[in-house]
């Protein structure tokens, strides 16, 4: 199969597929919000966040003017909070310039924008004929060309880039980047690709060679590390809850949490055995965050300041997932008692 025929077949498949992109927009602001939220999040989970985000911050001025706590509140539960901080920073830059980026290179200069997002935004918003290489595109090209090199290495990236550019010499990225991503997520899926109905089958070297399962070559994954935290739930006599704000460049940056201290695994086991504490485990990309909550005042030797905040206000603060879960659970008793 010739490349031109492959491209035409994919364009025809896409037209007939009925795939809709409800959030797709030519507005740079909306396109940027959607791309950023969906960077590490599936559409099913991200849609509600996109809607809420655009309602709360309908344009770049409202986002630039907002307090970072308000941005984190809308973001709460989505994870990768660094994205929210960087978006807020980028919004201020755009507002100050009074201009949105016009090219891929200009998008790349905004905080929080990597090569994939820059390519996607420049091609969708500015009509630039440039690649946008996400995991779907990596997988599809690895299979079409039976690439047995590490496509995450510098050399692999260069090679892949030149292959995608070769396709773009025959079509336009504005439409083709979307087609590739949709083809990867709907047909050439990571597991059980739909080879029997695939319009690219005759072009696919891995299909011919029977190497589909081995493409792309897997990224070597770093083993996840475990971290252990003891959190403290304490409501004082004025019905105020002890809370702490994480400011350090670490997990939960900018979020509120219950006051806490990080401990070693050996200590963790003994705390859990002795106290029967409620526990929670959060899975992040490179680490497991294990937390347990003790219902007592935080000891004075913890390295984070405790602020006592009226319980109804404390509940509304943007916070990490563990604290949210404990507070939702433990605050119920206080709210019920308050109503009696
Ligand atoms: S034949 Fe299978 S592996 Fe090859 S492109 Fe089509 S779906 Fe992907």
Image (spheres, rainbow, N blue to C red):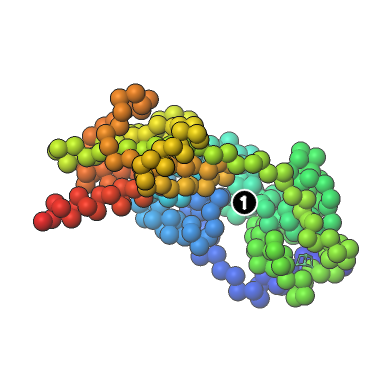
User: Quick check: can you spot residue 236?
Assistant: yes
Please give the name of the residue rendered at 57% of the width and 45% of the height, measured from the top-left corner.
285
Residue with the mark numbered 1:
120
Please give the name of the residue rendered at 43% of the width and 59% of the height, measured from the top-left corner.
48
Q: Position of residue 304 (x, y in %)?
A: 36, 28
Screen quadrant of the C terminus:
bottom left
Q: Position of residue 85 (x, y in %)?
A: 45, 38
Label 1 CB sits under 8 Å from any ligand 1 atom = no
- Residue 119 placement, left or right of 76: right
Quadrant hosting ligand 1: bottom right
Please give the name of the residue rendered at 28% of the width and 49% of the height, measured from the top-left corner.
330
Nearer to me, 33 or 249: 249
Q: Secondary structure at mark 1?
A: helix
User: Quick check: can you spot residue 92?
Assistant: no
Q: Position of residue 96 (x, y in %)?
A: 43, 35
Classify 232 as above or below 18.
above
Q: How many marks?
A: 1
- Residue 106 placement, left or right of 239: right
Nearer to me, 104 or 289: 289
Q: Position of residue 115 (x, y in %)?
A: 65, 43
């Amino acid at each position: 199969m010739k490349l031109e025929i492959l491209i035409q077949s994919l364009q025809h498949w896409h037209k007939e597929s009925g795939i809709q992109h409800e959030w797709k927009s030519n507005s740079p602001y909306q396109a940027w919000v959607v791309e950023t939220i969906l960077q590490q999040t599936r559409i099913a989970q991200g849609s509600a966040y996109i809607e809420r985000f655009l309602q709360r911050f309908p344009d770049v001025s409202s986002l630039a003017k907002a307090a970072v706590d308000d941005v984190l509140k809308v973001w709460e539960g989505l994870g990768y909070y660094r994205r929210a901080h960087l978006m807020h920073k980028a919004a201020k830059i755009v507002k100050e310039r009074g201009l949105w980026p016009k090219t891929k290179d200009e998008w790349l200069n905004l905080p929080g924008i990597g090569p994939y997002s820059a390519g996607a935004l420049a091609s969708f918003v500015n009509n630039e004929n440039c690649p946008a290489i996400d995991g779907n595109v990596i997988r599809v090209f690895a299979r079409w060309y039976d690439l047995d090199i590490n496509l995450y290495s510098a050399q692999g990236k260069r090679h892949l880039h030149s292959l995608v550019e070769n396709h773009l010499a025959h079509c336009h990225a504005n439409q083709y980047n979307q087609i590739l991503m949709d083809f990867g997520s709907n047909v050439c899926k990571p597991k059980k690709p739909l080879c029997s109905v695939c319009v690219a089958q005759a072009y696919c070297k891995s299909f011919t060679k029977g190497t589909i399962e081995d493409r792309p070559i897997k990224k070597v994954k770093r083993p996840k590390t475990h971290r252990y935290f003891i959190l403290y739930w304490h409501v004082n006599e004025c019905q105020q809850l002890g809370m702490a704000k994480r400011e350090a460049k670490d997990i939960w940056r900018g979020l509120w949490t219950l006051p806490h201290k990080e401990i070693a695994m050996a200590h963790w086991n003994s705390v859990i055995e002795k106290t029967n504490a409620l526990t929670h485990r959060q899975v992040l990309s490179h680490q497991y965050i294990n937390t347990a909550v003790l219902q007592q005042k935080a000891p004075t030797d913890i390295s984070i300041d405790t602020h006592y905040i009226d319980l109804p206000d404390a509940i509304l603060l943007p916070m990490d997932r563990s604290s949210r879960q404990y507070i939702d659970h433990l605050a119920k008793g206080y709210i019920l008692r308050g109503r009696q």
